[in-house]
Amino acid sequence: MNAIEIQNVTKRYKDVTALEDVSLSFAFGKIYGLLGRNGAGKSTLINIIANRIFADCGEVRIDGIPAKENMGVHEKLFCMSEADLYDRDLKVKELFKWTDRFYDAFDSDKALALSEKFNLDIHKRFKALSKGYQSIFKLIVALSLRVPYVIFDEPVLGLDANHRELFYELLLEEFETGERTFILATHLIEEVANLIEEVVLIDKGKVLLQESVEALSETGYSISGTAQEVDSYCEGKNVIGQDTLGGMKIAYISGEKAALPQGSNLQIAAINLQKLFVKLTEKGGNGNE
Amino acid sequence: MNKLKAAVLYEYATKIKAMGVFYLIQYAITALIFAIVLIFTDGSQTGSNALEFSSVVFVSVIGVLGYKEDFKALLQNGYTRKSIFLSTVCMFVLLCGTMALIDTVIGNTIHHFAKQYFTLFGSLYGYSSLFANWLWLTVLYLLFCSLSYLAILVIHRIGKTASLLLAIGLGGGVLLVIALFRFVLSDKAVRAVADFWIRAMGFTGDGTTNIFFPVITFLVIGLVFGLGAFALIRRAELKG
């Protein structure tokens, strides 16, 4: 099977369980959003996939090949990290040169062309770049590598709105020109909502849900009106969260839309991905939801 | 390009500049000392000898950087710990060989023109073989590289506080061993241990020297440190 398969992965740090029996898969040829609050376990999961840390138990396979300490997956996966792992004293062009030597799949010409698009000065040392341009450098490396699976950990950290737009545009271009899998781990859910096809939501070390954005938008909705009417409507439904303001109430419901009672003043609206994320993670980890 | 070769070249190339700066500073200072001593004495002294000691300090720092910098950078580029370890060992061999060559050539050249200057190897074994000098220095530098590589891996694994306690413990252990040798062990036992190490350093009982004994001794000790380092890096995780 062409996919990153994560099977029963658990990772503990002293008395903290960062991931608990996580099983999921990232299929080839899709753009995923890996969402979760700070400390939810996203980076831990990414670091285990990228062989930077080890799972206490469980296994990660990439296209059926075990990913742990295996050079066989070197040309299959690249992980752009939020953390600075590059030699800070090297110039950008030198870092491109070395990446080209490390990976058969690296396209140096593309990296240079993208540097021009982003106005990245390739003669500068990595440490002399601003935080935003350091992120841009890492994005360019990831976008110039034609490996089947690319993970972006907080890809737009420190980028201004223009550069963020450019990145999303280039990402889609890349996806259209060559089928592969992009996994975006980010907090900026609304920005990526139109890019991603499938969402993996992690909270407190567990997978809360893995579903397509389309299915999510079809199954989740909000209902607003007076508290009494809303409460009455919500009976027997899977309410994932609610907000109240005075006598008014909005409830967020997961499941198929039920018809409104006759003569009711309730209003139904679609629930956006960000709201769904907030409500699901606010409630806490319930794997059944 | 072969992945291991690329990693070795990366590790080596990123140290070359530091090595150049090190030698530039070292020989600039040495030239200054030589000039001062020449001006203020009758020229019978050089003011500095056995510059290889500073190279030992430098390669020890490289041993630390070999883990701290390169481990992160190569993990980022998809290398496994085993391949990182192999490439680092290859880099150590290349770097130590290069530095030993530079130190052998320059040290012996200085000695040739100023007999009062002595190299580390020359002061122990004489100046008869440049190859032996280079080989001995290479394995000596390798030993210190592997020692500092092991030390930084231990620090990474057990943390700063435990490392400090370990260092205190090791210091205490050294004092204890000295005390044992001075006050507890018999003269015969002390003599046997001393004889062993004298022979291991290549000084035979008949007044001659055998250069391969210290080379093998350094290699064996370096190998022990290296095996310890491999055992630790196999389970090393990226931190922070």
Image (cartoon, coloured by chain):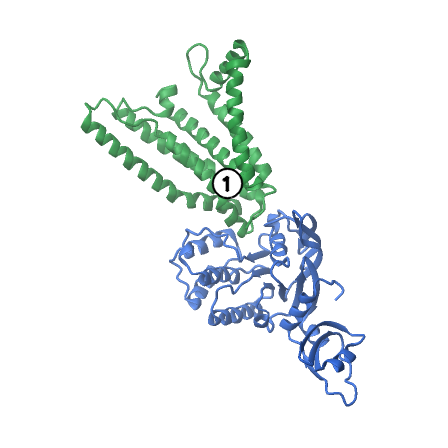
Chain colours: A blue, B green
Residue B154 seen from this side: no
Which residue in the rendered view is the most extreme toward the front? Answer: A246
**Is A233 placed above or below A31 here?**
below
**Is B54 placed above or below A18 here?**
above
Would you name the residue on which mark 1 appears? B88
Of helix, strand and loop, which one carries label 1?
Answer: helix
Label 1 is found on which chain of the structure? B
* Count of marks placed on residues: 1
Picture quarter containing residue B100?
Answer: top left
For the residue pair B221 and B174, the one nearer the viewer reads as B174
Tell me where residue A129 appears, x and y as whole percent.
41, 59
Point 80% across, 76% down: residue = A235
**Is A17 placed above or below B234 here?**
below
Q: Is residue B94 left or right of residue A1?
A: left
Tell me where residue A277 appears, x and y as whole percent.
65, 69
Disc 1 marks a residue whose amino acid type is Thr
For the residue pair B216 and A236, the one nearer the viewer reads as A236
Which residue in the rendered view is the most extreme toward the right? Answer: A236
Residue B81 seen from this side: yes
Point 39% across, 33% down: residue = B55
For the residue pair B150 and A25, the one nearer the viewer reads as B150
Point 40% across, 57% down: residue = A128
Tell me where residue A138 appears, x and y as whole percent.
49, 59
Picture quarter containing residue B121?
Answer: top left
Picture quarter containing residue A186?
Answer: bottom right
Tell me where residue A137 appears, x and y as whole percent.
46, 60
Which residue in the rendered view is the most extreme toward the bottom? Answer: A263
Point 46% across, 20% down: residue = B201
